[in-house]
Amino acid sequence: MPMRPFPKLRPTAWDALVVLAVIVLAAGTAFFQWRGGSSGELTAVVSIDGAEVDRFAPADLLEGPRTYHANGYTLTVAMAMDYETPSPGILPPKGEAGICVSSSDCPTQDCVRTGILSRGGQSAVCLPGRFVLRLEGGAAEDGGVDAVLG
Amino acid sequence: MKRLTAYALFLALLLSGCGASADPDTAQESIQVIAMDTAMLITTYGERSVPAAYAAEDCIRDLEAKLSRTIEDSEVSRLNAAGGEPVEIGEDLWELLDLARSYSDYTGGAFDITIAPVVSAWGFTEDSFQVPFPATVKKLLMLVDMTSVSQSPYPLTGEGPLTASLGPGQEIDLGGIAKGYAADKLVEVFKEHACPRALAQLGGNVLAYGGRPDGTPWRVGIQDPARPDDKNAFAGVLELTDAFAVTSGGYQRYFEQDGKTYHHIIDPATGYPADSGLTSVTVVADCETPEGYRTGTMCDAFSTALFVMGEEKALDLWRSWTAPAFELVLVTEDGRVVVTGGLKDRFTPDESSGYAYETVS
């Protein structure tokens, strides 16, 4: 028995619209995922009460420190350089530069004592202020660690 | 045109999928949580990494709401305020009380959750630090007694109310065990969401679930207690797969008064900060055991207790312990790092630290 031929269908404007919508959606999704997958430049992220309130390149602090108000406390984030044991006169730098919580009026001062953050994954936390300063991204380094105990 | 449409759809689907499903193991989500009096960072992997991370946060918040001593309507707060009367509690607190009793027994009282009133007298609960009067310490120490904590037997049917009561004037603080218990619960969350790997940092507790995306173990540094301000200074690095690791040290939380430093790990025998010759204790155990032990809880309780007990008693306990196995890294005041034999191939010393390294068996 001879097969009945398929009817010839003519593409409509709806076909074109569907194709366009799918392509736009797919390209958008791919862009979003590619962008998110990159480790990217070293970036400082500030969050208060679990919500991100600031994100900047550490070098931006060369323009001046940044001040945050967190649950009744005031914290300042600034550039920092580590020095050898203080001595009269010039303090020779040890070479480690980074960012830090330079001052806080919180009672514990743990955030200030945390010291210099210079690598992705490091963070300084103020529990009374529910404030977190965290470094993200940056180049992976040989012998680096994924987490720190203590 | 139909053929063109088909090609376009195929291309579009290919494009949309290439970011995620090509390698689902590398899809990841990181969330930062401030809970249980500490900052936590949880990174989950896999196709369901996002719901897994948020389920982990929900799990932690749920536990905090039940177990916190500073949340007014938590189960622990109600128990502390009950004046010795029985209080109905949930399964999590019931299980934690049961485990806390066991670890108090195993450590000869070096771990004791009824230390709460003494910890408060030092101001560590409310961050209003002070050195209490000796008479106050002596009086409060009389309340430190785990044997006065009672709880209803677990109903054989698995149903029915669970209750607990404290001795008159007693209070409990689960700060030395709750984060470990939370880490145990996170293992269940990650399994439910089919996470191939995850890394959870809960204060001084780390859960290394699975291994790194490249198949190697997670690298976890142990902060050098002599250089707490240097975030890159380690006493050594652990390589962990499917494991818990918990560190306790006096450098983590302390205050200074009249030129003297007082840290937050209080010896239940004296009521004063522990002075055992150790500067940090790290306890490591597998997170998957055939018997289904809560090994995260064990690591948390032991890290505190062994810091109080000191090197000799800590190693005695390690040698006499049968199951589930745990391993230790002890950093001593006299500049040694003592590593137990089971970590021999999983611990890398930091030779630049100046410590003398010893492996014991």
Image (cartoon, coloured by chain):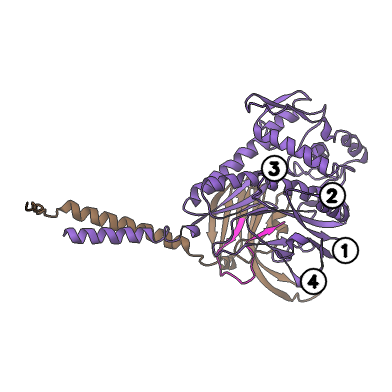
Measured as percent of width and height from the top left, residue B201 is found at 64, 53
Between B344 and B36, the one lying in front of the other is B344
Q: Residue at x 24, y 56 (%)?
A: A19
What label does residue B308 carry, if any? 2
Report which quarter residue B198 is drawn in. bottom right
The residue where tag 4 is placed is A85
Q: Which residues are magenta?
A: A133-150
Alpha carbon distance from label 4 to label 3 = 40 Å
Please tell me whether mark 3 sits on a helix, a strand or a loop: helix
Q: Residue at x 87, y 45 (%)?
A: B272
Disc 3 + disc 2, Cβ < 8 Å:
no
Disc 4 + disc 1, Cβ < 8 Å:
no
Category of crowding for the residue at label 4, using alpha-carbon neighbours closer than 10 angstroms: few (below 14), some (14–19), many (at least 20): few
Please tell me whether mark 2 sits on a helix, a strand or a loop: helix
Residue type for callout 2: Val
Give the number of the mark in front: 4 or 1: 1
Q: Residue at x 43, y 58 (%)?
A: B20
The residue where tag 1 is placed is B334
Question: Which chain: brown?
Answer: A
Measured as percent of width and height from the top left, residue B149 is found at 79, 31
Q: Which residue, as the protein is rendered here, is positioned at the far front? A: A1
Say whether residue B200 is magenta.
Answer: no
Helix, strand or loop: magenta stretch: loop
Chain label for disc 2: B
Residue type for callout 1: Asp
